[in-house]
Amino acid sequence: MTMPTPQCPWRMQVHHIHQETPDVWTLSLLCHDYYPYRAGQYALVSIRNSADTLRAYTLSSTPGVSEYITITVRRLENGAGSQWLTREVKRGDYLWLSDAQGEFTCDNQASDKLLLLAAGCGVTPVMSMRRWLAKYRPQTDVQVIFSVRSPQDVIFADEWQRYPVTLVAEQNATAGFVPGRLTPELLRAVPDLAERTVMTCGPAPYMEQVEDAVKSLGVTRFFKEKFFTPVAEAATSGLKFTRLQPARTFYAPVGSTLLEALESNKVPVNAACRAGVCGCCKTQIISGQYSVNSTMTLTPQEIADGFVLACSCHPESDLVLA
Ligand code: FES
């Protein structure tokens, strides 16, 4: 079986698949070579082993601890990647993964007091780091608060019994769950909160709320996983985008990336890494001012022709798109 794209050079075989919750599955993969990664990182997966559909998933396993490389996937109704991974892929199949990517990791944190805050599927890098800390920094004081919709949505439910964790359930809270959502009171109850390094992963509105709350309580070392990018509401003013094919006009606030402008207006665009690495979001600009912070996958000719990586493109005026 040949490599579908140079971006995904790692062939891995599905060893087994475990259902975590009604809509989340963990795929355990065997890599016959040594696959370097750090706790909390993610990889791109080639969907249907194709070159043009890549999706990013956290590596929920832990280097030096887990027997397999694992990805943990929530099935989304219209998710090309998650539908394939959770419905069609079976034991023995092969997947192709990219190198591990991302900076959301705890192995560079010198702090001996951590607070890890997760919501929903955002728990995947948190569990990866939690295991890593238990093995390599057992003296670290680690507090975890994990928010879920309801008790049945606790991903890695068995494994959490090994680690101290506060579980918060928005609905149907049973014994062992704090009912409702993460509140400033719950945060205030964390010992030595202001001294802790706080790391969070979850839906964008959750992370924003967490950031405001912990900073107002004195936290100065705060990190969030940027991988879960918000899809904002479509704007009605700001920078104007004129798309020629098919013809369409839309707006986005000044300061948005081109990818955010496209996604918030439901203009079809592929995005996997959101970090200028995978090349999925290539888009051509006909006219207008913009700056870019990655052109990694583009050829000099493409750059000359106005192609950009939408996730790494910062519009500075109204733009006309091909
Ligand atoms: S989404 Fe990967 S380069 Fe833009």
Image (cartoon, grey):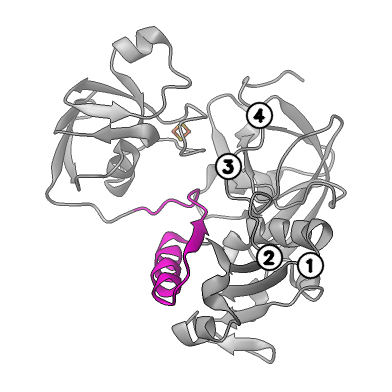
Is 216 rendered above or below residue 253? below
Mark number, residue 102: 3
- Give the quarter of the image for residue 160: bottom right
Mark 3 neighbour density, 10 Å: few (under 14) some (14–19) many (20 or more): some
Which of marks 4 and 3 precedes in the sequence? 4
- Give the quarter of the image for residue 239: top left
Whether the magenta-drawn stretch holds residue 204 is answered as yes
- Disc 1 + disc 2, Cβ < 8 Å: yes
Secondary structure at badge 1 equals loop
The amino acid at mark 1 is Gln
Over which residues does the magenta segment extend? 203-231
Which residue is denoted by mark 4 in the rendering? 49
The amino acid at mark 3 is Gly
Which of marks 2 and 3 precedes in the sequence? 3
Which residue is denoted by mark 1 in the rendering? 139
Q: CA distance from mark 3 to mark 1?
A: 25 Å
Mark 4 neighbour density, 10 Å: few (under 14) some (14–19) many (20 or more): some
Which of marks 2 and 1 precedes in the sequence? 2
> Viewed as shown, does residue 67 lie left or right of 183?
right
Which residue is denoted by mark 2 in the rendering? 112
Mark 2 neighbour density, 10 Å: few (under 14) some (14–19) many (20 or more): some
> Viewed as shown, does residue 193 lie left or right of 216?
right
